[in-house]
Amino acid sequence: MKIVSITPQEAKALADKGAVLVDVREPGERAAGYIPNDRNLPLSRLTPVPVESSGKPVIFYCASGARTRMNASALDAIGGAEPKIMAGGIMGWAQAGYPIARG
């Protein structure tokens, strides 16, 4: 399966319906801001075990979308039935005016 790239708007719509958002950034980057109710699975710690999503789509994001694109094959392997990459990363999410949590 080829992992699909979606816009922040599409990601938000899917997240509102229960899709699982997964931040692949390292904890230090995440502290500057992340999408509320997401999961953190840094690329440096990827395992071959699929992300538990109860059959819902899994949407991966990083800072700008570059790392998720470069690691698409690895993310596809653990993304469950409907893995996706959010184009623009959290920067695109923020530019679209969606909420960012800090801490």
Image: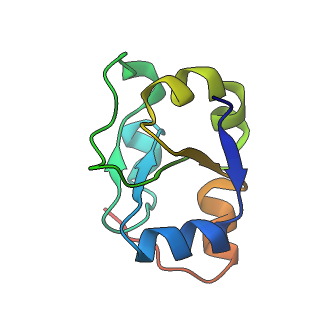
Q: Residue at x 54, y 73 (%)?
A: 12
Q: In this view of the protein, can residue 62 be seen by the observer?
A: no
Q: In this view of the protein, can residue 89 be seen by the observer?
A: yes
Q: Position of residue 32 (x, y in %)?
A: 45, 58
Considering every residue shown, the one lying at the far top of the view is: 48
Q: How many marks?
A: 0
Q: With 13 as the anchor, is 88 left or right in this view?
A: right
**Where on the picture, by quarter, is residue 18?**
bottom left
Q: Position of residue 86 (x, y in %)?
A: 64, 54
Q: With 58 as the anchor, is 6 left or right in this view?
A: right
In front here: 91 or 15? 15
Q: Residue at x 30, y 65 (%)?
A: 37
Q: With 62 as the anchor, is 80 left or right in this view?
A: left
Q: With 47 as the anchor, is 88 left or right in this view?
A: right
Tell me: residue 5, above or below residue 51: below
Q: Position of residue 33 (x, y in %)?
A: 45, 62
Q: Residue at x 71, y 64 (%)?
A: 7
Q: Position of residue 45 (x, y in %)?
A: 36, 21
Quarter that holds the C terminus: bottom left
Quarter that holds the N terminus: top right
Tell me: residue 58, above or below residue 3: below
Q: Residue at x 66, y 62 (%)?
A: 91
Tell me: residue 31, above or below residue 9: above
Tell me: residue 59, above or below residue 1: below
Considering every residue shown, the one lying at the far bottom of the view is: 97
Question: What sort of colour scheme is used for the picture?
Answer: rainbow
**Where on the picture, by quarter, is residue 98?**
bottom right
